[in-house]
């Protein structure tokens, strides 16, 4: 039986073959926590190879600060980048490397950037117009979904790789593909100006959160 680390290593290797421009501080692979499929960021980080990234989506959990601090400690030891979702105070108190912003909070990210924040900022974007807003707000990269058919409860109708590529050509910021991305589907994004892969279900059963 193959381990979660094996799956993560294959996914990271596949993401690294994407050819879109990406600053060195951005990892090619971002793995997102999920309350059903992968709720524990510490276990997820433990499964990832160095040079990967994690977005901790805490959904207001009561223990989010303690969890984030443990995740940051392990991430720093392993060479993994960690962002927290939509919570500047949690990022500051935990020492996270950055913040992932929902599209509706892009303006807040812009105000924080204007005040001099040097944290890594990613944001969700659901239109070309949102990509433009994100770039002007100082967002470092955008996560665009849903690219491929996905079993996620929140997944929308898949746009497909060529529509995603068209968005990328209309924007000058790094774009991560999200939704149905796995080591097989990510190959369809090679040579399409896509900068990275963002995944949830492609890395399952990491560490103690096996289900």
Image (tube, grey):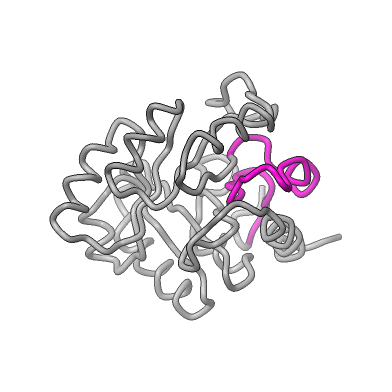
**Which residue is at a point 73% across and 62% down the rendered structure image?**
13
Query: Seen from this angle, which residue lies furthest right?
Result: 1
| Image x and y of residue 131, in percent | 41, 35
In the image, 97 versus 141, the foreground residue is 141
Q: Is 30 a magenta residue?
A: no
- Quadrant where the N terminus lies? bottom right
> What secondary structure prevails in the magenta region?
loop
User: In this image, 159 relative to 90: left or right?
Assistant: right
Quadrant of res 185 = top right
In the image, 67 versus 164, the foreground residue is 164
User: Where is 95 relative to 155, above or below?
Assistant: below
**Which residue is at a point 63% across and 27% down the rendered structure image?**
163
Query: Seen from this angle, which residue lies furthest left?
Result: 115
| Image x and y of residue 41, in percent | 49, 58
**Which residue is at a point 57% across and 21% down the rendered structure image?**
156
User: Where is 105 relative to 26, above or below?
Assistant: above
Magenta stretch: give its range. Answer: 178-206
| Image x and y of residue 203, in percent | 67, 52
Quadrant of res 119 = bottom left
Q: Is 191 a magenta residue?
A: yes
User: In this image, 36 relative to 116: left or right?
Assistant: right
| Image x and y of residue 159, in percent | 63, 24
């Amino acid at each position: 039986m193959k381990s979660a680390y094996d799956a993560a290593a294959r996914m990271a290797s596949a993401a690294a073959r994407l050819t879109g421009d990406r600053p060195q501080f951005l990892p090619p692979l971002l793995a997102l926590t999920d309350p059903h499929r992968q709720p524990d960021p510490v276990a997820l980080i433990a499964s990832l190879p160095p040079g990967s990234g994690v977005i901790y989506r805490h959904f207001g959990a009561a223990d989010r600060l303690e969890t984030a601090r443990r995740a940051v400690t392990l991430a720093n030891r392993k060479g993994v980048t960690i962002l927290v979702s939509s919570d500047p105070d949690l990022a500051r108190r935990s020492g996270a490397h950055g913040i992932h912003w929902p599209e509706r909070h892009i303006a807040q990210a812009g105000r924080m950037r204007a005040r001099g924040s040097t944290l890594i900022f990613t944001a969700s974007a659901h239109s070309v117009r949102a990509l433009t807003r994100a770039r002007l707000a100082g967002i470092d990269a955008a996560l665009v979904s849903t690219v491929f058919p996905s079993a996620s409860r929140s997944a929308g109708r898949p746009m497909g790789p060529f529509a995603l590529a068209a968005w990328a050509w209309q924007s000058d910021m790094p774009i991560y593909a999200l939704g149905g991305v796995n080591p097989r589907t990510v190959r369809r994004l090679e040579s399409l100006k896509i900068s990275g892969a963002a995944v949830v279900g492609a890395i399952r059963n990491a560490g103690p959160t096996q289900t």
